[in-house]
Image (cartoon, coloured by chain):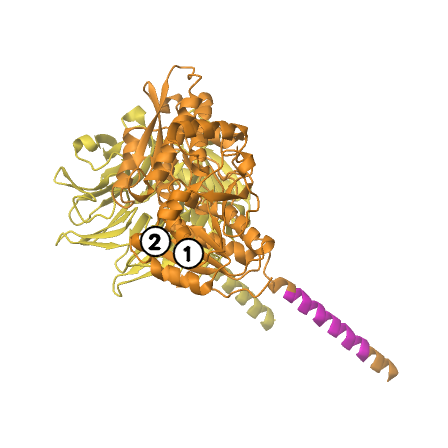
């Protein structure tokens, strides 16, 4: 009997342990793996056309440059063109070994993106046979160039910060500056972890660039455990600043983050100054282009790492303001009468990089791509340029505090300008504290 | 004794059933003979983006015009000088009812009819954009995938319809490919995933990357592998659509997703420019060869030149032998050589003509032919090898 009881107890205990073990194993199995099924790897080009038969013919090698030269973005476009021209001038101080010249084929991107812009890119790639394309900071321009560049096989160096351009596995695209994701993380870190701000308003434009930036910033905040900001999406084709002003006044934000084109940046900054005077303004690089009313300091001495409230911060490369950057700034100032913006400096570096690579590759698009991808990085006027295997610039970025151009900021009366319209308002939860 | 008899009968029945199942899923065809069209035999140089067989004729869209092959010879190369909307031809579709040829080019849409081209551009018609990446004929309608949305052109009335981010759930209006059936239209959108239009219900249904993260895929068969879709095909026999991305291959059967990467399949590369499908076959046009997946047997077959790495590095030794790599579901692989090969390993598209296939590569057009005796010999050698 005793034996029977003992046996039964042992048997029950063993059964219980076995069941427990099975349950633990089952739980372990049903728990989703933390390792993703796939993540983006190196984008390699296994295609053809490296042979000399595919070298571009003619005494002049052309580099395509896409920039807005009319309309509200005109200043930004002119700054890009001026910087690119200076870059070409400087890079060609030593002529190419075969005596060929290099010229810029400039395409005005102020035409409607869904109409003439596609035709312009085709003309540039197929008829003008550019060896590479440098795009403006516009996400639409970058994506259109990327689509055609992938089909035809043309390297694209983009000034756009849209991260999705390099999250594709394409071997043809290279980004000169920090992506939206990098910029958003830097801004979010400063806002939430350094400054402790919890009333934040995000203003972005109704286009793929604005959408990508807003998404990146919202994700960056979630990553830090913060709630999403109050989000405004503005339509540049309509006029209604009053609604935006009203909402900013009601929310009384501590910080306002802008992912807007430069022409709207000055208007929104003026509006924020009126409606929420003490709010700190954070700009992505594209928002701080020429025409935004922002001026960039010429030397390190004028950089203010932590300016007082009510000031403006912009994301730049950690090497911004280095010695060659200052030399470039002086030349740019002598040429245009202005200080260069980070995006203009990246245009200068893009042209410099292409010419450097061309000296090794010769006038062949596929070999030029290989050279750009193999480059070990160099210190440009915008900072370090070093591509990872997806074409992203690995350089570390930082925030700097800047001053506004007084004449522009004071003269703008937002209510008198038919600039944009609030088309949607998304209100997230306001953080009570960290 | 009786028990043994019953058991024997059961085993015999199972064997017969297994044999029947085996017979129902034949092995994939093996293409052992390749005829290439390159500048050596009058074909224009550079990329071939698309191909469309049409009886004894074959139309090929290249970087340097539209090529007409007739009875295996280059008959004519049409360019903008002949009235084509653009020299870089991305897509071709033949209207089986009228014999008209619709050409999607970087420069607009062209209709070749009665020996003449009529062009449709953004300025001269309702075409959404002059960057035409895809074209497909569906009865009286011609469907066009452009960089600014999808167009439908009614060839009877001349009316144009347009769908883009303003009237359909397009995340982005950039459309890279299109496929049609009698009931539905399938669109490959750059950044917008796959969009399916229901003709009876007049509505669009989007299929996008479920984890909303472009650079990673969390779970294998969770959904579409990537939002940037380079090509689309519908297979009426499998009732599935297949989407190619630069990140891998995705198939959807109406209920479940079936995703494939190089790491878990016989796919030659995750960089896929186009996909086509017929019967149980799915053809992925990758940058490292042409991969065929047999959905029923789960066997993968990849075709490419033996010297493909040399082709990639521009040390080209063309017209060399080819290689066939077979991957079985158990993970075993076998490689064999064929005397002829595809023109290049960088594959841009594929089309079917009876049992034959036509392959658009980055350096020429290839015609793949099955040689039954050679095929049997190879399969025998594979079986012996296994």
The numbered mark, 1 or 2, whose residue comes first in the sequence reads: 1
Residue at left offset 44%, top offset 37%: A341
A292 vs B280, nearest the viewer: A292
Q: Position of residue B42 (x, y in %)?
A: 27, 26
Residue with the mark numbered 2: A414
Q: Position of residue B83 (x, y in %)?
A: 17, 34
Q: Is residue A9 magenta?
A: yes
The hue of chain A in the figure is orange
Label 2: which secondary element: helix
Left or right: A134 in relation to A386: left
Specify the quadrant that holds the N terminus of chain A.
bottom right
Residue with the mark numbered 1: A274
Q: Position of residue B106 (x, y in %)?
A: 27, 39
Q: Residues within 10 Å of mark 2 (few under 14, many from 20)?
A: many
Spatial CA span between label 1 and label 2: 10 Å
The reply to whether the C-beta atoms of the residues labelled 1 and 2 are less than 8 Å apart is: yes
Could you confirm whether marks 1 and 2 are on the same chain? yes
The hue of chain B in the figure is yellow
Dominant secondary structure, magenta: helix
A280 vs B247, nearest the viewer: A280
Label 1: which secondary element: helix
A387 vs B201, nearest the viewer: A387
In the image, which residues are magenta?
A8-27
Residue at left offset 49%, top offset 55%: A279
Chain of the residue where label 1 is placed in the rendered structure: A
In the displayed structure, A266 sits above or below A339; it is below
């Amino acid at each position: 009997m005793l034996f029977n009881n003992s046996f039964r107890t042992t048997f029950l205990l063993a059964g219980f342990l076995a069941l427990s073990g099975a349950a633990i194993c089952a739980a372990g199995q049903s728990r989703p793996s933390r390792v993703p099924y796939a993540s983006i790897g190196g984008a390699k080009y296994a295609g053809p056309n490296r042979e000399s038969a595919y070298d571009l013919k003619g005494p002049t090698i052309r580099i395509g440059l896409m920039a807005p030269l009319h309309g509200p973005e005109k200043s930004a476009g002119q700054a890009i063109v001026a910087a690119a021209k200076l870059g070409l001038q400087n890079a060609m101080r030593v002529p190419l070994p075969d005596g060929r010249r290099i010229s810029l084929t400039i395409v005005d991107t102020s035409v409607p993106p869904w109409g003439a812009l596609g035709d312009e890119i085709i003309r540039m790639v197929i008829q003008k046979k550019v060896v590479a394309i440098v795009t403006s900071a516009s996400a639409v321009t970058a994506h259109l160039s990327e689509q055609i560049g992938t089909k035809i096989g043309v390297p694209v160096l983009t000034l756009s910060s849209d991260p999705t351009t390099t999250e594709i596995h394409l071997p043809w695209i290279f980004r000169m500056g920090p992506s939206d994701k990098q910029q958003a993380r830097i801004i979010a870190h400063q806002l939430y972890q350094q400054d402790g701000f919890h009333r934040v308003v995000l203003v972005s434009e109704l286009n793929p660039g604005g959408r990508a930036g807003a998404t990146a910033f919202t994700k960056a905040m979630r990553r830090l455990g913060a709630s999403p900001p109050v989000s405004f999406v503005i339509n540049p084709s309509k006029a209604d600043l009053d609604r935006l002003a009203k909402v900013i006044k009601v929310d009384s934000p501590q910080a306002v983050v802008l992912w807007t084109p430069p022409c709207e940046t000055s208007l929104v900054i003026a509006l924020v100054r009126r409606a929420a005077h003490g709010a700190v303004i954070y700009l992505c690089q594209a928002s701080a282009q020429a025409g935004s009313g922002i001026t960039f300091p010429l030397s390190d001495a004028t950089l203010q790492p932590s300016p007082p409230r009510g000031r403006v911060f912009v994301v730049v490369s950690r090497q911004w303001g280095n010695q060659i950057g200052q030399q470039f700034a002086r030349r740019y100032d002598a040429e245009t009468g202005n200080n260069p913006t980070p995006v203009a400096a990246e245009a200068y570096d893009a042209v410099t990089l292409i010419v450097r690579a061309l000296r090794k590759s010769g006038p062949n698009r596929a070999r030029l791509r290989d050279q750009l991808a193999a480059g070990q990085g160099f210190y440009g006027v915008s900072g370090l340029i070093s591509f990872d295997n997806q074409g992203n610039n690995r350089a570390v970025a930082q925030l700097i505090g800047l001053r506004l151009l007084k004449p522009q900021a004071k003269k703008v009366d937002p209510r008198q300008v038919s600039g944009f319209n609030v088309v949607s308002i998304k209100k997230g939860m306001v953080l009570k504290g960290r | 004794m009786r028990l043994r008899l019953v058991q024997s009968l059961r085993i015999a029945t199972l064997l017969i059933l297994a044999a029947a199942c085996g017979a129902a899923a034949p092995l994939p065809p093996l293409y052992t003979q390749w005829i290439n069209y390159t500048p050596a035999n009058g074909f224009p140089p550079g990329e071939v983006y698309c191909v469309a067989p049409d009886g004894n004729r074959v139309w090929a869209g290249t970087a340097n015009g539209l090529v007409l092959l007739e009875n295996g010879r280059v008959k004519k190369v049409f360019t903008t000088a002949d009235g084509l909307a653009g020299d870089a031809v991305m897509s071709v579709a033949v209207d089986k009812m009228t014999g008209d040829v619709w050409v999607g080019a970087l420069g607009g849409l062209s209709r070749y009819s009665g020996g003449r081209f009529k062009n449709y551009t953004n300025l001269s018609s309702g075409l959404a954009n002059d960057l035409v990446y895809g074209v497909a004929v569906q009865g009286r309608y011609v469907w066009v995938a452009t960089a600014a949305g999808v167009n439908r052109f009614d060839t009877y009335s001349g009316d144009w319809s347009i769908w883009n981010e303003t009237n359909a759930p397009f995340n982005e209006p950039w459309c890279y490919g299109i496929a049609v059936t009698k009931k539905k239209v399938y669109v490959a959108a750059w950044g917008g995933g796959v969009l399916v239009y229901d003709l009876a219900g007049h509505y669009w249904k989007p299929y996008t990357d479920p984890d909303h993260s472009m650079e990673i895929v969390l779970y294998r068969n969770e959904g579409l592998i990537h939002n940037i879709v380079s090509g689309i095909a519908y297979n009426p026999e499998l009732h599935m659509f297949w989407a190619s991305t630069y990140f891998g291959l995705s198939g959807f059967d109406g209920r479940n997703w079936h995703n494939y990467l190089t790491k878990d399949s016989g796919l030659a590369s995750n960089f896929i420019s186009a996909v086509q499908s017929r019967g149980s076959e799915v053809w992925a046009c990758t940058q490292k060869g042409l991969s065929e997946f047999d959905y029923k047997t789960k066997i993968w077959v990849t075709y490419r030149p033996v010297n493909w790495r040399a082709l990639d590095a521009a040390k080209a030794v063309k017209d060399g032998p080819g290689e066939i790599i077979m991957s079985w579901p158990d993970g075993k692989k076998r490689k064999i050589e064929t005397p002829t090969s595809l023109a290049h390993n960088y594959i841009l598209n594929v089309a079917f003509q009876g049992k034959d296939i036509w392959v658009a590569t980055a350096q020429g057009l290839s015609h793949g032919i099955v040689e039954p005796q050679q095929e049997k010999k190879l399969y025998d050698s594979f079986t012996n090898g296994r």
